[in-house]
Amino acid sequence: MSGSLTPVEEAIAHLLSQASVITETRHLPLTESFDRILAQDYHVPADVPPADNSAVDGYALRAEDYVPGQALSVSDRIPAGSAPSPLKPGTAARIFTGSEVPAGADTVIMQERVEVTDSGILINAEVKADQNIRRRGQDLAQGSLALGKGTKIRAQEMGLFASMGVSEVAVVEKLRVAILSTGDELVEPGTPLAQGQIYNTNRFTLLGLLAEAGCDVVLCETLRDTRSVTRETLERAAAQADLIITSGGVSVGEEDHVRAVLEESGKLSLWRMAIKPGKPLAFGSINGTPVLGLPGNPAAVLVTFLIVGMPYIRTCQGRVQIHPVGQQVPAAFTVTSPSVRKEFVRARTESASGDTRVCAYPNQSSGVLSSACWAGGLAVVPEHAMVAEGDLLTYYPFTELLS
């Protein structure tokens, strides 16, 4: 395995080329479908709305029956949910928001522009056809594609399904992921620290990230720093999971066993990426199950998961949108020492006097996870680049990176 650094885009492309799309599906009630991925296309079974309906409370009439200053008698009252009779010529019908417009009517005048008199209604507004009417099929036309395979179901999609009368949807099974933390120094929160010990931060960061990514964690263990335990646990995880994610153990130290086991007993197809933070990133497989080896430093785990891991997971899920969409925002910080690695700066946008700029956390050490709690996303500093205040940088909000 070469010691050269793989560019970020090349590394992502390699991972995506190795991704296997999940083929297992299940049908879920619409009430349980939030945040799942559609396994098939859905076409509109019937027009939405199913009939012309009123957009306001008011009066339905035929525009040509309106004569300025002349009252129109009210011949009907149409509450929402009722089937209206055809409108009698030369009259108006009292109508409410969402009520079906009666045959013969071609406009609705809102009640605020109408004066009710003993002889009928007087209209104090311009009257023309098609006012305040939501036409049949205006939202969705029968037979058209409503939602495509690979769409992530949000609240909006749940509502759209309901509007079509769909009560059950086909979704992709969740990706099964094993989390393996490495290091004899790691202990769980709630345990007093002995000298030389630290809390297992990465386990909990990854649990949260994978939950947001819509994955199931099927195994979550801490590996002791021995070659045999690392090999046995990786092989056991491979039998249970679609993807194994490790943190630590992929650098060049004598106690970094994950990379060594992949080289000896599996396959290592990527190691060391030109990214900051997170250079010691590895990708390979054990017994046919892909292994994504993340660095050990907490901020590097977060960054590499978001930048490399999430596109891979989205591809496995069959998602439509694989890559995040960034914003171009002027920098409020400087970079005077160019790096050979692309840097993902923990940052957030701030506005002053109508001017929005992206600000960097002062300490960008890969061990400073508090920077990510302060930040709203990641700003990208390209390889070999210096940054002056006001230079445009690509900024990815965390919400976009995890959507």
Image (cartoon, rainbow, N blue to C red):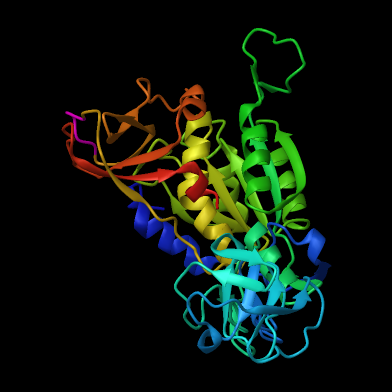
Q: Residue at x 40, y 46 (%)?
A: 396
Q: Can residue 197 be seen in the rendering of this structure?
A: yes
| Image coordinates for residue 278, horizontal then vertical, percent | 43, 38
Q: Quadrant of residue 293?
A: top right
Magenta residue check for 338: yes
Q: Which residues are magenta?
A: 335-339
Query: Which residue is at the far front?
Result: 118
Judge whether 331 appears above or below 39 on screen.
above
> What residue is at 71 percent from the left and 72 percent from the top?
94
- Identify the residue at horizontal 47%, vertical 80% (top origin): 128
Q: Is residue 34 left or right of residue 272?
A: right
Q: State the image coordinates of residue 387 (x, y, percent, origin top left).
A: 18, 35
Decide which of 42, 112 is in the foreground and name it: 112
Q: Residue furthest top?
A: 195
Rendered location of residue 48, percent (x, y): 66, 80
Q: Is residue 23 visible?
A: no
**Magenta span main SS:** loop
